[in-house]
Image (spheres, helix red, strand yellow):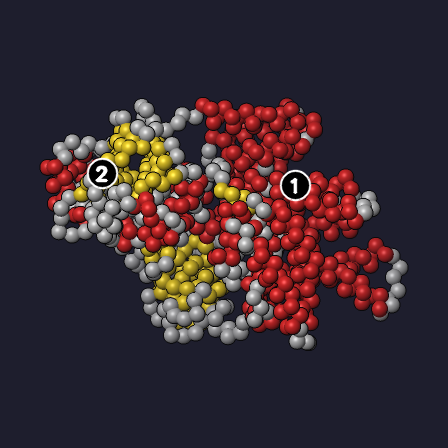
Amino acid sequence: MGCFITLYTANTAVFYLISFAVILAAAYFKPFLPILSGFICGIFLVFFHYLVFYSQSECDLRPKKPVIANFQVISIHSAQSPFYVKASLKSIQGCSLSILKPPLAMISVSTAQKLTVGDEVSAQIKLKPFRSVKNYNSFDRERHAFRQRLFYKGRTVSKIQIENQTGKPTSTEVYRNYISTITTGSQLQWLYYALLTGDKSKISQQNKQQLRELGISHLLAISGLHIGLVYAIGFYFSKYITRIMRIPVSQTRQINSWFMLIGFCFAATYVYLSGFAVSAVRALLMLGCLLFIYILNKNPLRWRTILYALTLVLIIDPFTLLNPGLYFSFIAVAIIFLVIRSSLGKNLGFYRRVIQLGLIQLALFIGLLPLSLFYFDGVSTIGLLVNLVAVPIISVIVLPFLVLYSFLSLLLDLSLLLYGLDFVLNYLYQSIMLVPKQWRWLEFAFVEFNTLVLIYSTLLLFLCYPYRSFAIIPVLIVTFDWLLSPKSTFQLDVFDVGHGLMVMLSEENKAVVYDLGPRYFGRYDYIQSVLLANINALKLEVIATIVSHQDNDHIGGLHSWNENGFGATLKYFHPHGVNARCEPKLLKIGNVSLTSFSMPGDNNNDQSCILRVKSGEYSVLLTGDISAEAEQQLITRLPDLQATVLVSPHHGSNTSSSQAFIEQVRPKLVIHSSAYQGQWQFPHPEVVKRYQDRDIAQLSTADSGHIRIKFYNDTFLVESAREHESYWFEQD
């Protein structure tokens, strides 16, 4: 508990309140003393790991100033120069780095030399702290990088010097290449490769999405299922060898301990070859705890075993709590224990075993449902049925076959057997995919972290018989919080899309989108990962879309927007197509009115579609990329431009936000949509000063991330993703 509370609430009122409650309880009730000691140990453990392994050194890293760095290549993500590599930083000029566990960095290396994993390289690098966009309801790349200790990113700016070139692939690479070779030609190679190596790089985005919709993504992560199977192979293989060699055995339990050790070594070797995947290491630790307790003549199938395993995992790294897989793994094991505890030691018949397996799948579906809603904003509607079929097939047929196939292929060519299995599995997979997508996955409104904690607290209290009546308390807390929370009249979302603009205005369940953000390399944009993620999480219906002008940083996501079926929403404001200027229109959504117009100009920027939003005494002004010249025309045409919130023209460029314009609009808050340490360095210092001189509050997506403003009848509330979605160890 100490690790969990410290990791998620340190430096907040909640942390101090819970700490005080635990100390108070321990002072008056002696049974709470062990809880207090564990709580204190958890606090120290989190801060110790943070200071030793996760805190970054104070380095003077400037975006345009190269530093000399030595690094070792861990993995390579491109086949030709410039190589995009994950590297372990051995030294950085002017920085002191952790010797125990050097930080990682993603580095773009331009060189004609061939790089291999394990090479030690020295070069001048433009290095900066790892930073990505930060939005509500979206995948947090920064937190994902933090979990991997990936603290920096950069590119080489000088000729590299390879100081120690290994030239030899690692054992993991040899193993993965071998598995890739023996599964080549099969239609589901990505499945077999992932099951045997834990590497999901061969799985396409489409296949990942399909597996998620079917509710079987968990089968591809090396977990207890895989580790248990490899352990069983080692255990029974050693037992079989002992039997055929007729080795005399005096004590069954003692020789069983040796069999268990051999099985554990098999499992540990498998984890090593998988590259020490987090889920694999976690499963191996749980197996080790279970075997150790068994050797001590204790019953391993008890709750204490789970607690021992969890404690061991957290001692090794308490920041593992940031990994969703930890919660899925331990809650799943706890659920299985709950279902089977009444039948332990009993000889159940075949049909009762089948019924028990069905109950386990049903319990897992219900028990893991809140986690699925929290992390994936939805649930697989057919996952329960698919798992009833897929889990036995994978665990009893496919995985054992693949393990034996990988061993025997060293001596024999068994590819025909693989192709036969592949044909049957691919037929089953394609048959399941005939189920319409809308029947496979059900989207749900966003579940907040506090709600998730309260749900599991309620379930835990309900399962504890003496305290079952207390389960109503979390339910009442959630209910009263929902009833007493005021409802906003409308909401403004300015998304963090780097250098670009993407805004959404919503009232009740209706939304209007203004600009679609940038598109990079002709294939990547923020429509799916950010805009649609928020639309789905908030359960909104988009009724209109406005594109201010033709620049890539405003219209880049148009292709994806159309592909996702929102092309018709452009017709209201753009009846002649998005290449023409928007039409002057008035759109009313409840009590919110939206007025569009544009200024005549000599370039795309000055012809930007301007949108004014008004509800009661509050208003918002969106101006695209208009310059000071267009601003003057706007002032002349519409003298009454006053707005509560202004999204700064042209991202805060010095060619816009003239003094006359600022005085005419008189906003209480101005928002700059710009990139962190971007090429243009927006907002311009002169623009910032002009707003400061008039005591106007300013926020930038570069510093605050996604900015959300909720307007109420008598006030408005400003929230930002970097403030509300960041924990103490992520703060700038």
Report the front residue among 156 and 500: 500
In screen coordinates, is 494 left or right of 29? left
Q: Amino acid at mark 2?
A: Lys
Report the front residue among 454 and 285: 454
Residue 301 in the image: above or below residue 393: above
The mark total stands at 2
For label 1, the SS is helix
| Displayed quadrant of residue 96 | bottom left
Label disc, if present, on residue 363 of the rendered structure: 1
Residue tagged 2: 585
In screen coordinates, is 506 left or right of 441? left
x%, y% of residue 600?
13, 46
Residue 613 in the image: above or below residue 354: above
Which residue is at 63% across, 63% downward?
424
Report the front residue among 311 and 462: 462
In screen coordinates, is 127 left or right of 164? left
Quadrant position of the N terminus in the picture = top right
For label 2, the SS is strand
| Displayed quadrant of residue 618 | top left
Q: Is residue 93 visible?
A: yes
In screen coordinates, is 415 left or right of 658? right
